[in-house]
Amino acid sequence: MPKVIADIDEVLTTTRSVRRKLDFDRPVEPEVIEECLALAQQATMGSNQEDWRFVAVTDAAQKAAIGEIYRDTWLQTVEIPLRDRRPATVARLDPGERGGDAARARQQRILDSVKYLVDNIERVPVLVFACSAKPVPRTVLGDAASGYYGSIIPITWSFQLALRSRGLGSVMATAVVFHAERLSEILALPEGTHPITMVPVAYTKTLDFKRAPRRPLNEILRWERWGSDAA
Ligand SMILES: Cc1cc2nc3c(=O)[nH]c(=O)nc-3n(C[C@H](O)[C@H](O)[C@H](O)COP(=O)(O)O)c2cc1C
């Protein structure tokens, strides 16, 4: 597949989470999914173990089953907790909790966009599921959690970057694993393999995506140590 955006800095800065601008009517060739995933396989991984597995779903009946649990996920994790003003969800998702008009408006746009995807998930040409084949840990992971599930995120993000460079959009839609067991059944995952995130994939209606506003670097980076006191 020819690259439509070859400049790596442009790919890095304009790979947005795409929901509304996914083109549901343009078919996605299986080859482009395979090519992008083969590129993404070069991502970093824990313990040099390729314990990631992917399932790409295009079948209408499979998508309908996934749509059912995705809509229920929205209800259980967003709509009902926000309606009932549950503090943890309000703090995490309510636009009213964000400081400043711009941040509030952006959070409202994201929520509307997430709901749009929930309502239209069956129309997305390919739903890719990134899964982990690591056995479920027997002990509480605590501080070791980053190493446990960390490998699936770099490969998934590389996949999203490769898609963007070829004119496709995607989003890391982790929420659906709220129904991990039902999802594992639908995808017929082997024992010990569990879903980590869904990645809806389609060509995008435009290629014109922009950098998103982010905190100034000096709010997230310190050199040598975080605190200001000399050691
Ligand atoms: C770990 C993780 C989980 C996410 N879960 C969801 C999700 O469940 N549904 C969704 O629509 N977007 C999800 N996103 C996308 C974020 O909402 C999005 O990245 C964020 O709002 C910033 O927007 P941008 O990616 O366009 O810069 C997730 C992203 C990450 C990295």
Image: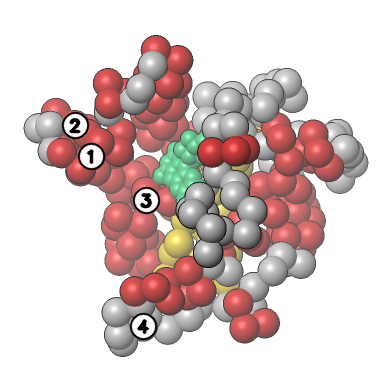
Residue 25 tag number: none
The x and y percentages for residue 45 are 64, 73
Find out whether the residues at labels 4 and 1 contact each other: C-beta distance under 8 Å: no
**For this view, does 79 lie left or right of residue 210?**
left
- Reply above or below: 17 against 60: above
Q: Which mark is residue 82?
A: 2
Viewer-nearest of discs 3 and 4: 4
- Direction left: furthest residue: 84
Q: Nearer the viewer, mark 2 or mark 3?
A: 2
Q: Amino acid at mark 1?
A: Thr
**Residues marked 2 and 1 touching at CB (< 8 Å):** yes
Residue at (79% x, 34% y) in the render: 10
Precedes in sequence: disc 3 or disc 4: 4
Say whether residue 83 is visible. yes
List the single residue furthest toward the bottom: 138
Disc 1 crowd rating (10 Å Cα; few below 14, some 14-19, many 20+) is some
State which quadrant residue 202 falls in.
Answer: top right
Which amino acid, by three-letter code, is at mark 3? Val
Mark 3 lies on a secondary structure that is helix
Mark 2 / mark 3, whichever is N-terminal: 2
Say which quadrant the N terminus sits in. top right
Q: Which residue in the protein does label 4 denote?
A: 137
**Dot 3 corresponds to which residue?**
176
- Badge 2 amino acid: Leu
Q: Residue at x 75, y 48 (%)?
A: 162
Which is nearer the eye, 217 or 39? 217
Q: CA distance from mark 2 to mark 1?
A: 6 Å
- The answer to whether mark 3 is within 8 Å of ligand 1 is yes
